[in-house]
Every structure is written in C-alpha cells, then in structure tokens.
Amino acid sequence: MKLKSARTLLFVPATSAHLLAKAAERGADAIVIDLEDAVPISRKAEARALAGAAVEQLAARGATVVLRVNPEPEWLAADLAAVPLEKLAAVMLPKVEAACQVSAVETELLRLAPHRPELELIALIESARGVLAAERIAMASTRLCALGFGAEDYASEMSVRPEPASLAWPAQQVATCARAYGLACWGLPGSVGNVSDSAALAELVVQARAMGFTGSVCIHPAQVSIMNAGFGPTAAELDWAQRVVDAARAAAEAGLGAVLLDGKMIDKPIVERARHWIETRR
C-alpha cells in the first residue's frame, strides 16, 4: 500500500525484540521502528544496531516500515547510517519546528541513498513553533508524504491537558496545512497514551477524522483495530456514498449538472467526497 493512505502506524521501540517479532501481525498499515522517545539515551547505540536487523526482517515479511529518528543532528546522522535505507518506506522526523529541518534530512538522504528518490519523509509537529510553521513545513520537500501532530508534547509545552478542548485549534491547523498541500495527516486532538479505554479512543478518532486527520500513530496493538475502523467511512456513509454516485451517474446521463437526493442538492464536491469514501474501502 502507499504510505500516504495509511490509517494506522504502530510504534515499536527498536530495543523491544519481543514486540518487533509480532509487529507485522498486528494489522497496522505501517510499522514505525522508534529510535527516539521510546529508547533511553544510554541505549541509543544498541538501538541502532537492533533497528537495522528489524528493518530487514519486517520488510522481508512484507511490512511497510518507517524509521523514527532522533532530531539532534549528530544522532540523526548515525540513525540513518545504521539501517538499510533501501528497505524503508519513510523516515519520520520528530519535533519539527522549521522547514530547514526537513531540508537537512532530505540532503542527508540524497547523500546516503541517491538511488532512492522515492524514500519519503514524515514531519511530526509537536510544539507551538511547529504549529505556527506548519504551512512552511508542508512545503519543505517533495519527499514529504505526511505531517503528524504530537498532542502530548504540544500539551506539555502549553501546560494544558491533552484533550480536544485544549488541542482542537493546533490539531486542525496541522491537518489543514497538510491537506492543503496534498499530504496525509496523522494524529489525534488528545492523548494516544490511554490504552485501556477503547470507547474514549474511538470517540477521539471520530473527532480527529472530523478535523481532517487521515490516520494516527498507535502505541499499543490494541489500538490498531479501533483506529483502522474509525479512520475509514462507516457502513452508513458508504451506503450514502454509493447512492450519491448512482444518483450523479443518472443525472449525467440525463444531461443534468446536479440532482436532489434525500431532499438535498448533490453537486460536484459532494460527489467527489462520496467517490473518495468508496475508493478508501476498496
């Protein structure tokens, strides 16, 4: 699958061999091998060695593999040099606050893997400065396939609770900038850290989708199925979409530009949304 269409990206620490062994069986659209927050400083070098083997193994099993690197320049370069870049779908860059950070990683990828121009980038926006620079970040590289919103880090910087009441504006700002430039946008307007309350997570996914988010990272396998379902159209929406497409086809055959369905006018933007929902589920 194309990474841009991913609904779920399951984080797995590079140092967790038992989690990596089953990562490809969890149903996530992509696996993110994490070298950043999930790895203590004392184990960074060990994690790089383990990450290289994990990328090879997961890619061999047909998984879409992403590497989350450390943002510090000296660690970032070592992270990229430690893994087989030809096996990766993308590099995820955390704590992005300026377009130049994305450009710097692009330059490094050109040096290390000049034969992989299709290797994509994901920029995680996790701070107030990052949110304000989201549009410039979205334009920083043709390799970018997605922006991500880091609710926990943003909430921590703002000294607020990671919940929709505090995060609705920055979350939607990131989503809007991503979609304006044809990128996917992954995240939630709240914490992804609660792994025990599935109903609360499902509701958070509903709110994220309503804001324009196309998917989210997962930190626990139990979250994958909830997000896979929540970031796609519901059965009722698919039924509506099919009726819209059918009505539009009939209108076109009759030489009409718009048609009434369920008492509402159906025109081009609505038909395009309906077709997109149908294509999403194929």
Image: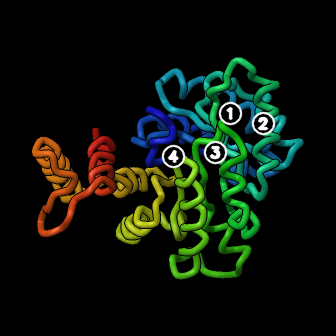
Residue drawn at the location 77% of the way across and 51% of the way down: 99
| Side of 7 where 95 appears, left or right | right
The disc label shown at residue 51, or none: 1
Residue at the outermost front position? 255
Mark 3 and mark 2 lie on one chain; the one further toward the N terminus is 2
| Side of 77 where 233 appears, left or right | left
Count neighbours of disc 4 (C-alpha within 10 A) and say few if under 14, some if 14 to 19, many if 20 or more: many
Residue drawn at the location 45% of the way across and 40% of the way down: 29
According to the image, what is the colour scheme of the structure? rainbow
> Which is in the foreground here, disc 1 or disc 2?
2
The disc label shown at residue 25, or none: none
Q: Which residue is mark 3?
A: 122
Q: Is residue 174 above or below residue 277?
A: below
The disc label shown at residue 79, or none: 2
Marks 4/3: CA–CA distance? 12 Å
Residue drawn at the location 65% of the way across and 74% of the way down: 155
Amino acid beneath label 4: Leu
Marks 1/3: CA–CA distance? 18 Å
Asked if marks 1 and 3 touch (Cβ < 8 Å), the reply is no
Q: Which residue is mark 4?
A: 9
Mark 4 and mark 2 lie on one chain; the one further toward the N terminus is 4
Check disc 2 and report its element: helix, strand or loop: helix
Q: Is residue 36 visible?
A: yes
Amino acid beneath label 3: Ile
Marks 1/2: CA–CA distance? 9 Å
Mark 1 and mark 2 lie on one chain; the one further toward the N terminus is 1
Amino acid beneath label 2: Asp
